[in-house]
Amino acid sequence: MIFVGKRPNHLGVRDGQLTPCPNTPNCVCSQSSDTVHKIEPLTYTSTPEQAFANLKRLIESLPRTKIITESEDYLHIEFTLPIVRFVDDVEFYLERNANVIHVRSASRVGMSDLGVNRRRIETIRTKYSSG
């Protein structure tokens, strides 16, 4: 598993912000302002608690996921890609007063992810909004 990379120690929420994406194109974040990294947050109409519980259930139903950190308004999940075994770090931050769940998805290694992180979040968004 040479492509796993070390688990980052700089992730999490600080002052209401997820860690900014690096300059590489293998990261998306709903709190980014540049077009390379920007992705829309998840939205909800239920209570914040129900929305986050629904998201957690969805994440747990996906293959090759491992919850690393969990709190009432934050999730850090490792997604392991099949075959090549690359590990991506995905974070969700519940911003209660805005009715959104911010998201950041980033590859641990390499420069390009061939759109994997963006597709992952859009797949989660589709399943989340239909679930």
Image: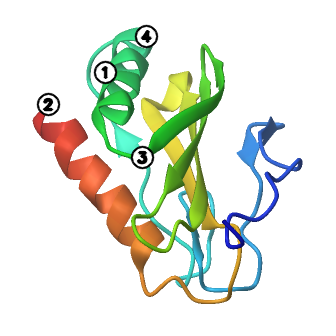
Q: Please state the horizontal and vertical placement of residue 70, each as a whole percent of the image.
A: 63, 21
Q: Please state the horizontal and vertical placement of residue 85, each as a whole percent of the image.
A: 53, 66
Please name the residue that numbered disc 4 is placed on.
Answer: 49
The amino acid beneath tag 1 is: Asn
The CA distance from mark 4 to mark 1 is 9 Å
Residue 39, placed above or below residue 76: below
The amino acid beneath tag 4 is: Glu
User: Which numbered mark, 4 or 1, is in the foreground of this view?
Assistant: 1
- Disc 4 secondary structure class: helix
Residue at 30% from the left image edge and 60% from the top image edge: 122
Question: Of callouts 4 and 1, which one flags the residue occurring earlier in the amino acid sequence?
Answer: 4
The CA distance from mark 4 to mark 2 is 15 Å
User: Which numbered mark, 4 or 2, is in the foreground of this view?
Assistant: 2
Question: Of callouts 3 and 1, which one flags the residue occurring earlier in the amino acid sequence?
Answer: 1
Residue at 44% from the left image edge and 87% from the top image edge: 114
User: Position of 92 compared to 60: left or right?
Assistant: right
User: Position of 44 compared to 66: left or right?
Assistant: left
Label ID, residue 117: none
Please name the residue that numbered disc 2 is placed on.
Answer: 131
- Disc 3 secondary structure class: loop
Residue 116 lies in quadrant: bottom left
User: Which numbered mark, 3 or 4, is in the foreground of this view?
Assistant: 3
